[in-house]
């Protein structure tokens, strides 16, 4: 089900849309690294082809996803395009289903899944991730 761009300008804009290493991802990673945490990026989700964790702390099994408001259906900021509306609705709904499946799959495998919206501030996101990682590392060292 390939979309037909409503205009050449829309096609050009969508082709430039970053799917990884977004400004928020880079800011959060910079803050995590600055606080002394080490992690891996774009780690494949075990057993789920073509899905990756934005940030992974493998030693404590914490998967982090930084979800774009438009692409993942933020309840505060999601919008519905008017051009090709049905195709977009189907695409965006599938993204949300895929997100739930990924979260459930990882949780069943013993991972803690942290999801954040792109509108959340990088310092707050980094603090919440840091708190989780440090708590799990502390608990596992007992």
Image (cartoon, rainbow, N blue to C red):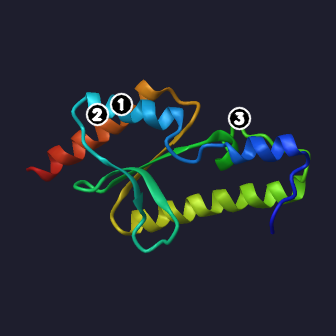
Q: Earlier in the sequence, mark 3 or mark 1?
A: 1
- Can residue 9 be seen by looking at this rendering? yes
Q: Are marks 2 and 1 in contact (CB under 8 Å)?
A: yes
Nearer to us in this view, 118 or 84: 84
Q: Earlier in the sequence, mark 3 or mark 2?
A: 2
Q: Residue at x 58, y 48 (%)?
A: 19
The nearer-to-camera label among 3 and 1 is 1
Q: Position of residue 26 (x, y in %)?
A: 44, 34
Left or right, 137 with respect to 75, comes to left
Q: Residues within 10 Å of mark 2 (few under 14, many from 20)?
A: few
Give me the C-alpha separation between circle 2 and circle 1.
Answer: 5 Å
Give me the C-alpha separation between circle 3 and circle 1.
Answer: 25 Å
Question: Which residue is labeled 1 in the image?
Answer: 30
Question: Which residue is labeled 3 in the image?
Answer: 77
Q: Secondary structure at mark 1?
A: helix
Q: Secondary structure at mark 3?
A: loop
Q: Are marks 3 and 1 in contact (CB under 8 Å)?
A: no
Nearer to us in this view, 40 or 110: 40
Q: Which mark is residue 33?
A: 2
């Amino acid at each position: 089900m390939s979309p037909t761009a409503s205009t050449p300008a829309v096609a050009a804009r969508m082709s430039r849309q970053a799917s990884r290493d977004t400004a928020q991802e880079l800011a959060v990673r910079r803050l995590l690294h600055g606080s002394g945490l080490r992690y891996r990026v774009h780690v494949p989700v075990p057993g789920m082809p073509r899905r990756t964790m934005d940030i992974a702390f493998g030693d404590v099994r914490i998967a982090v996803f930084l979800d774009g408001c438009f692409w993942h259906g933020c309840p505060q900021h999601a919008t519905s395009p008017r051009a090709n509306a049905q195709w977009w609705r189907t695409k965006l709904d599938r993204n949300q289903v895929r997100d739930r499946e990924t979260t459930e799959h990882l949780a069943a495998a013993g991972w803690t899944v942290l999801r954040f919206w792109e509108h959340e501030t990088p310092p707050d996101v980094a603090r919440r991730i840091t708190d989780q990682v440090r708590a799990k590392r502390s608990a596992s060292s007992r």
